[in-house]
Amino acid sequence: DGGITQSPKYLFRKEGQNVTLSCEQNLNHDAMYWYRQDPGQGLRLIYYSQIVNDFQKGDIAEGYSVSREKKESFPLTVTSAQKNPTAFYLCASSIWPFGGQPQHFGDGTRLSIL
Amino acid sequence: AQKITQTQPGMFVQEKEAVTLDCTYDTSDQSYGLFWYKQPSSGEMIFLIYQGSYDEQNATEGRYSLNFQKARKSANLVISASQLGDSAMYFCAMREDDGGTSYGKLTFGQGTILTVHP
């Protein structure tokens, strides 16, 4: 079955530590996205990418970094500069051109501070 | 400026009744898309329905329909014959189709928690 796989499901970060969240898709989608969701809130865009080796900052990129070395993969690193990283992180992908196609989401990673 | 507004933090509905979840949006683009997603307590985002700004008919998908009023910039979700499994958070989202420069990114509202009572 095609889909988006996020791992791990739960992640704990120590102070001063960088952690990387994995996102892999086998939908052959060009565009990929990372969102952050705080409890009881909507999703906010962290980074997005339309093609390999190209990505753009979203609304809340500070303290995060990404890479897009392969079409299928879009890992997100939460750096020590992100002072409040506790949140639910969702990865999504979309076919291009977009038309009526929705973004497809992974099951998310819950990140907490130890 | 907030682009997507969902004014109902929580809604309650009796099983088998219909319910409307409100969504208003703000954009200066002529071409855009509106989406509704369902998020159960487990966290995954489930796509429900899409409405394009040039679509003249309101979108429908099974028990879901979208009441699209372009002049009012509203895109309300109607769920008919509510079921207990409909209890979840519901998000309205917009994609501005400005020649592709927005890369298809979505702007989400704050969400509405729907509780279906037996």
Image (cartoon, coloured by chain):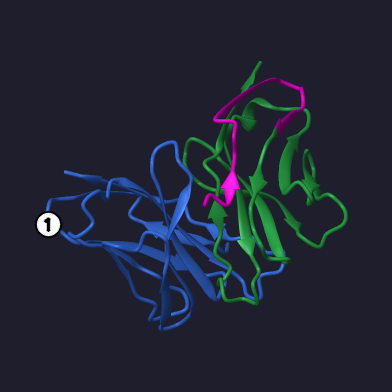
Q: Give the chain letter for blue.
A: A
The residue lying toward the viewer, choosing from A100 and A105, is A100
Location of the N terminus of chain A by quadrant is bottom right
Q: Answer above or below: position of B82 versus A48.
A: above
* Residue under the image location 69 percent in, 63 percent down: B32
- Would you name the residue on which mark 1 appears? A16
Label 1: state its secondary structure. loop
Q: Residue furthest bottom?
A: A53
Q: Amino acid at mark 1?
A: Gly
Count neighbours of disc 1 (C-alpha within 10 A) and say few if under 14, some if 14 to 19, many if 20 or more. few
Q: Residue at x 81, y 63 (%)?
A: B54
Q: What's the chain of the residue with tag 1?
A: A
Residue A90 image point, x, y percent: 44, 54
Extreme-right residue of the structure = B57
Q: Residue at x 68, y 64 (%)?
A: A101
Residue depicted at x 38% and y 43%: A38
Specify the segment rendered in magenta: B1-20
Colour assigned to chain B in the rendering is green
In the image: residue B36, left or right of residue A43: right
Tell me: B46 left or right of A56.
right
The quarter of the picture where the C terminus of chain A appears is: top left
Percent of width and height locating residue B77: 72, 40
Task: Check the image and report above or below for B28 versus A110.
Answer: below
Residues B49 and B75: in front is B75
Q: Tell me if residue B66 is in the magenta stretch.
A: no
Taking the image as shown, residue A114 lies to the left or right of residue A35, namely left
